[in-house]
Image (cartoon, rainbow, N blue to C red):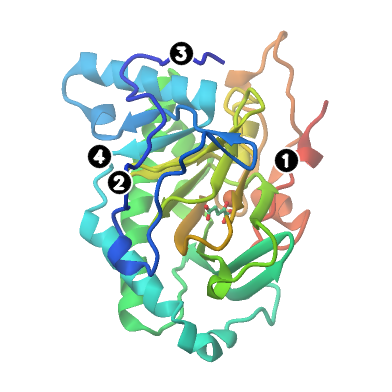
Amino acid sequence: MANTAPPLLLQGSYKPTNTTNYSKYSSITATCPNNDTINGAVDDGIPTIDYFMLFSSDPNQRSLALKTLSHACEDYGFFYLVNHGVPDSVLESVFRGMSEFFDPEQVEYRRQFEKKHPTDRIRWGLRSYPGENREYLKVVTHPQFHCPPKPAAFSEAMEEYYKRLREVVHGLAKALSKSLGLEECYIYKAFNLKSGFEVSAMNLYPPNFQSNGSMGISDHTDPGLFVSLIQQVDGGLQILSHQGKWINVYIPRNAILMQIGDQLEILSNGKYKSHVHRVVVERNEVRRLTVATLHGPSLDTFLSPAMEFVDDSHPPLYYGMTYKQSLEANGNEVDVQSNLEQLRRY
Ligand SMILES: O=C(O)CCC(=O)C(=O)O
Ligand SMILES: [Fe+2]
């Protein structure tokens, strides 16, 4: 629970100094907030993990990096991932494609993707309520990739991004298994990641640049192993820390924010915790595009606390069920709603 930095973490709150990287694709650029709090949140340190180091050929470097990963997962539950190998050009294409897709002139084209059937693999929504202000496109990206066919460059960019991202998540799963002293493929197998169920939300805040209240998405945790997030611009994402503080998120250029998902909390019997987060849209000042991807186990994977994390002094803290049952507890599998609270034994 330490506030102190584990070794090797490039620790400290990352604050962009002026405009952000993808500003050429957004109509308004964000600046770093001058005050230390936004709606009660503080600018605090978020650990940074160097992905490349986790696979270093130097055993000392590798072992230090794995220790750092395990500290970041246990003491924080979220971290910035740098040197992840997803090329800048892929990230740029994603935001260029999304900007085209969310073209304010093309709302009628997007309406065809409004939810018609609960199991639709592509879902579009425009929300402008006091509790939610965003336009989103939700798609199932694995085991099959789904995406609106137009614009073509958008669908191609997203497919390439998810493919690269999945490789990174599989690598992280290996590194995490090793850092826990487990066999390298332990988490990969426990989650059956080969057929992992992956859902991604592409978000635009505020919808059409107008919001009804200051909440982009209200407090929630997300199901899955990890939740990855990239954004075009800083502005509004906040995470609740283990210590109960809301922390403003400022993602370093081209880094990926990784957060522990509910099912890793369950498997690790609470050693690694899933975190509540939310998005606050401040006075419509920033037009922000984000891609949040929930990397889940396969739908038929039964998840419960693994025996490696259970003993006399650590009784199982969660009930077990399949991922599909978990997702269907509060909606359907494409809604990807958390049911963590219902799974707690105590
Ligand atoms: O867009 C963001 O910053 C967060 C999105 C999110 O939490 C979600 O889609 O689950
Ligand atoms: Fe989320």
Tell me how far mark 1 sits from mark 3, CA to CA: 29 Å
Disc 2 residue lies near ligand 1 with CB under 8 A? no
Tell me how far mark 2 sits from mark 3, CA to CA: 24 Å
Please give the label number shown on residue 72. none
Which label's residue is closer to the chain start, 3 or 4?
3
Tell me how far mark 3 sits from mark 4, CA to CA: 23 Å
Tell me how far mark 4 sits from mark 2, CA to CA: 11 Å
x 64%, y 42%: residue: 39
Which label's residue is closer to the chain start, 4 or 2?
4
SS type, badge 4: loop
Amino acid type, residue under disc 1 in the picture: Leu
Amino acid type, residue under disc 3 in the picture: Thr
Q: Which residue is mark 4?
A: 83
Q: Which residue is mark 1?
A: 340
SS type, badge 1: helix
SS type, badge 3: loop
Q: Which residue is mark 3?
A: 4
Which label's residue is closer to the chain start, 1 or 3?
3
User: Is label 4 in contact with label 2 (beta carbons under 8 Å)?
Assistant: no
Tell me how far mark 1 sits from mark 4, CA to CA: 32 Å
Which label's residue is closer to the chain start, 2 or 1?
2
Q: Which residue is mark 2?
A: 253
User: Is label 3 in contact with label 4 (beta carbons under 8 Å)?
Assistant: no
Amino acid type, residue under disc 4 in the picture: Asn
